Image (cartoon, coloured by chain):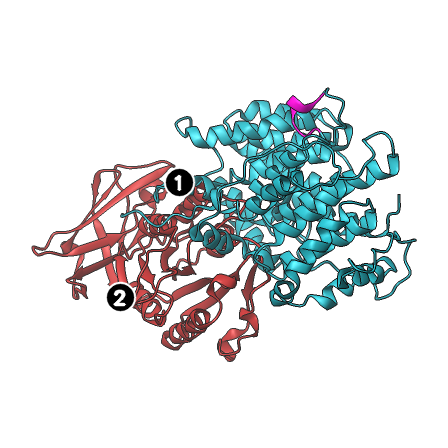
Amino acid sequence: MTSARAPRCGLAVLFLATAIGGRVTDAQSTPQPAPARPRIEPAPPPTPEDVAAWERLWGGPGALKPPEPPAAAKPSAPAPSPTPAPRDERTRFDDLLATYAAGDTAVIAREFRSAADFERVRPELVTTLSRWRSEWSPGRAAFALDIALTAFAQRWPDPGRFLAAARDIVIARPAPFGAQPADDAFELRFHRAAVAVLAALNAPRDVEHYLDSIASRVATTREGLGEGRPVDARLVLARATARELLTLPILLAAASRQDDVRRSWIAPDGDGEARRRLRAVLEPLDVAVEHADTRVEATVRRAFVLHRLGDHAGALAALDRVAAEGDAVIETWRALIRGRILAALDRPADAVAAYERAATLAPEAQTPAVALAALHLRRGTREQAVTWAARARSTPDGGRDPWPLYWTGDSRFLPGWLDELRTSRP
Amino acid sequence: VTLVRAVAVGCLLAPQAVGAQQPTFRGSAATVVVDVSVTNNGKDVPNLTAADFRLRDNGVAQTITRVTREALPIDVVCVADISSRTEGPLLDSFRRAFDEVIARLGGDDRASLVFFDPHIREIVGFEKRRLSVSAETRASSGGASVLIDALASSIVRSFDPGRRRMAVVFSDGQDAGSFLDESDVMDVAARSGVTIFAVAVTDGTTRTPQRPANVGLLSALAEVTGGAVEVVQRDEDVSVSFIRAFNAFRTSYVVQYTPAGVTGPGWHELDVRLVRPGRHTVRARKGYFGDAAPAAP
């Protein structure tokens, strides 16, 4: 067979990195006082093939729906009230911000209904966001993040520019970490939400670029620990999840540029690139397992990586060391991964039990049913296989399968985090 | 339409009592059934008999007991990617293709239809109204396609000893959302008893043709099950490929033998050839699992 045009999705997800990295450099050149920030190398621009492959796999930025706004003009929690801009600098965005701050967060979705709407106001918007860095206001940061999110949703070609501008408003705040606990909490929440946006877009390179760009403020790597900066375990886990996405078999096959590579979860000994990528996932996971609020999820992910590296016994031992938690999504992941590990250990009866637990935890999910159908067929219990396969084909399309969420990091928390940002007032 | 690999048309139809709990391969007591396609310059070769075939099971020559053609009804399942990548004229073309297949079904033939994008769903009740009703082919928004999970769950069905089974997959080969991997679906395919044909869609057109980015899996599935892969550019009418697949399967020979000198479970490699002189192309599935190939009633 001749070689096919392999998707370069591992690189395709650099889609937004240039803009985000570039904003960091821009921010350094502004005259506004700002904390020292690391210089990060701009990512190479994505090729058209990168973008096309990324769109082909995940449907492009349009896959991210605009945030569900609260009811229009709903007087929610006290909104931030940024200081009005001087009259001669005031733009329409200051007016929009005032409406937004009054509780009408749907104003952004109403004003920007297409990418063309963003194009029309781009210079004015960039200027306004830049000016907002000079005076710290959480409300402006939340507004800017919502602008970026809507830009993603409307397929504006350069949404990372707005996300970076929003980030710069936050990291330019004058007080250092520890001085203003409410501001500290807002900033961490902001970074979590921003990273979750990128994770929802299946943009792992951009997640890492974002995390690198805030390295002077928040530690998200083992190297950054113990340097007086706060550690946010969710952001550490977000780095791991981003790296894990790059180990999807289809991306590994694309990286190998061989059409006939069998795309399996298990990385063979001879596949150096796959194993290198998997080991890179373990680094942040080893940090995240040490923190209480991420221990269980990090352990589940770590077990899957160990399994994929061929250490099935180690993976099972790790998985069974942590107690179950109340998050049904994570417990479903654990049950599915446990089933796969047990099957690899030639314990099919136990694997069936694990998959059945996943099916119990997520009764409307297709993934456990598919796994059980395949496993029963392999065991020779065809009648059960047929039953589970039929169930897989008939589950309602309610988006209640936890497995796809495994690959989108903390995006499942995004609606809640956005609500908190919109209504928070340090 | 470019015929990339007119791989085997064939099928192990290991007859079994439906609902058998733990089917076992019963050695010499079992009858193994293999679909075999024979063509010469792309045309069917008619009027073949048992004496025209040579068949080896795990390297051991077998005595063919029966050869028939177009005697058994067919079950066909179409598994179609309806994600945003196939929306528009391409998906309209698929709808027409499926209608064409339905129109060619015989009285005892049966069809089923499974759509997938990030979600898998079987469409029921289409027989009476055809797929010109497009409501069911509305794609979900966003997300990664689950080709592997969809195909696996679509071909795991009850054995019916009196029927032959084929699947036609309509996809660009992309999958970034499945829980099963390629090894899993290859195993399912090998055990399923279904012959898999694939219509692989590219991003190209007839003026600037391309190959699908991930045709490797589809080719491997077709090869192991005795099916074929056709590559279709986005502006082509896919119904031609569907009809060709259906006709190829329908006109293939059904070769039966009772294994001798080979017993036990595990993978049995099949080698089917034509004794007749001439440049014939013989295609059949590559083997079967003994433990999943129970005896004929």
Per the image, the residue denoted by label 2 is B251
* Mark 2 burial class by Cα count in 10 Å: few <14, some 14-19, many 20+: many
Q: Hey, what amino acid is under mark 1?
A: Arg
For chain A, give the colour.
Answer: cyan
- Residue B55 lies, with reference to residue B102, above or below; the image says above
Q: Can residue B178 be seen in this view?
A: yes
Q: At 58% from the left edge and 22% from the top edge, which residue is drawn? A: A314
Magenta region, residue range: A219-225
Residue A33 disc label: none
- Please provide percent x and percent y for residue B208: 31, 63
Per the image, the residue denoted by label 1 is A262
For the C terminus of chain A, which image quadrant?
top right
- Residue B189 lies, with reference to residue B264, above or below; the image says below
The chain holding disc 2 is B
Question: Along the horizontal axis of the image, is B181 left or right of A192?
Answer: left
Q: At 78% from the left edge and 45% from the top edge, which residue is drawn? A: A134
